[in-house]
Image (cartoon, rainbow, N blue to C red):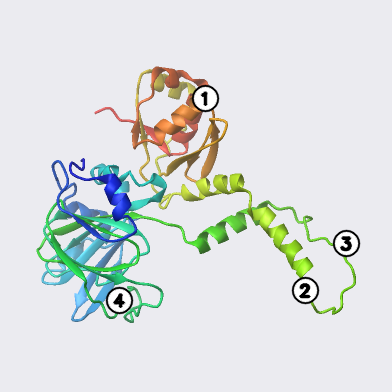
Amino acid sequence: MKLAHFDHALFLRDYWQKRPLLIRNPWDQWNNPLDPDELAGLACEEGVESRLIVREGERLALETGPLPEERFGQLAGATATLLVQAVDHHVPQVAALIEPFRFVPDWRIDDVMVSYAVDGGGVGPHFDQYDVFLIQGLGRRRWSVGPVCDADTPLLPHDDLRLIADFTATEEWVLEPGDILYVPPRYAHDGVAVSDDCMTYSIGFRAPSLAELVEGWGEHQADALPDDLRYTDPDLTAQAHPGEISPHALDRLHRLVQASLGDRSAFARWFGAYASQPKYPEIDWRPDEPLAQAEVCARLAEGVGLSRNPASRFAFIRRPDEAVVLFVDGEAIDCAGHRAMFAELICGGLEAQLSPALAVAPDVVDLVTLLVNNGSLAFTEAE
């Protein structure tokens, strides 16, 4: 699918992380990629994150999956909403919805959540800490958007759901199939189905918190530091009060910590590995038996393409020497020459076809063998 009438540059300039935007059916041709029964089937599977929200009077009750198949037969007449996370990891047609939004870097993309609701269904007014594109797949949904929220925004008492206590809408739209609503982080919003068979595809974008970055980078550096690297003060002189921590000592301690955390190259390598950690590593594409390098070489020479495990995360960082560091599922791999060309190619999309030169390059074959046996890549099945 392609967005036929959408100005990426204008959107990033005027709307991204600034204000909501309704985009009326911009697709060249909209086709709903998933049947409601298929979504229900995914919600019954082990290893698939799913939630069922049922309205009971004025209260919303939450059930977590996997859901028993018979549960859906018990919902006749109930106002219910089904939410299934990371559907793009299981359904290629849903994964294809991400492609038109890759003007946002891949490392920011989280996954595609799919919701199904009957008339009146919804999850209640809430706010998220991430950007989201809400694509209407089937039926109609009324979206209300309110003000920007923060940690002090009053919430309703609920064990499982973070619902806004006093939601006041400032804008409201009814979305038809193919319509898109962009909601920036922390904007209050509420979606209510106004038809049965209402399906919405939510493409979410992650943003690490400062607390997560400080904790992760700090722990990484601490683990690598030798125990004998310690504070020293060979120039110590007597001070007026023995209970004081002097400015001189504080300056030296601060410089010591800054020196260990201020290495930008080391931070870049750590962050690439951190950002490429898979969210659902249990989606395992490893072959039953590891492939030998000779077999991989032969298949590449035959022109067989490669497919990325949709649960795997790929990214790369350029180095000053024209090499790159490839990051796959939390691992850093230095790549130069043909390997660097392959790294950029495989980060470009879910499928890749190697050129004859890359297909026979020994260092590329070696890397492909590693990634296939790790389950991050697989050979494209012949249709």
Q: Position of residue 371 (x, y in %)?
A: 46, 35
Comes first in the chain, label 1 or label 2 = 2
Mark 3 lies on residue: 235
Q: What crowding class fits label 1: few (fewer than 14 Cα within 10 Å), some (14-19), or many (20 or more)?
A: some
Q: Position of residue 181 (x, y in %)?
A: 22, 57
- Mark 4 or 2: in front is 2
Q: CA distance from mark 3 to mark 4?
A: 58 Å
Residue 315 is left or right of residue 186, and the answer is right
Query: Residue placed at 74% from the left, 64% from the top?
Result: 251
Q: Residue 90, can we see it?
A: no
When the figure is inspected, residue 296 is found, relative to residue 134, above or below; the finding is: above
Report which quarter residue 287 is drawn in.
top left
Comes first in the chain, label 3 or label 1 = 3
Q: What crowding class fits label 4: few (fewer than 14 Cα within 10 Å), some (14-19), or many (20 or more)?
A: many
Residue farthest to the right, as pictured: 238
Residue 26's disc number: none
Comes first in the chain, label 1 or label 4 = 4
- Mark 3 or 1: in front is 3
Judging depth in this view, the residue of 9 and 369 nearest the camera is 9
Query: Residue placed at 50% from the left, 62% from the top?
Result: 210
When the figure is inspected, residue 368 is found, relative to residue 169, above or below; the finding is: above
When the figure is inspected, residue 275 is found, relative to residue 82, above or below; the finding is: above
Report which quarter residue 22 is drawn in.
bottom left
Mark 4 lies on residue: 164
Judging depth in this view, the residue of 82 and 270 nearest the camera is 270
State if disc 2 and disc 4 touch (CB < 8 Å): no
Mark 1 lies on residue: 337
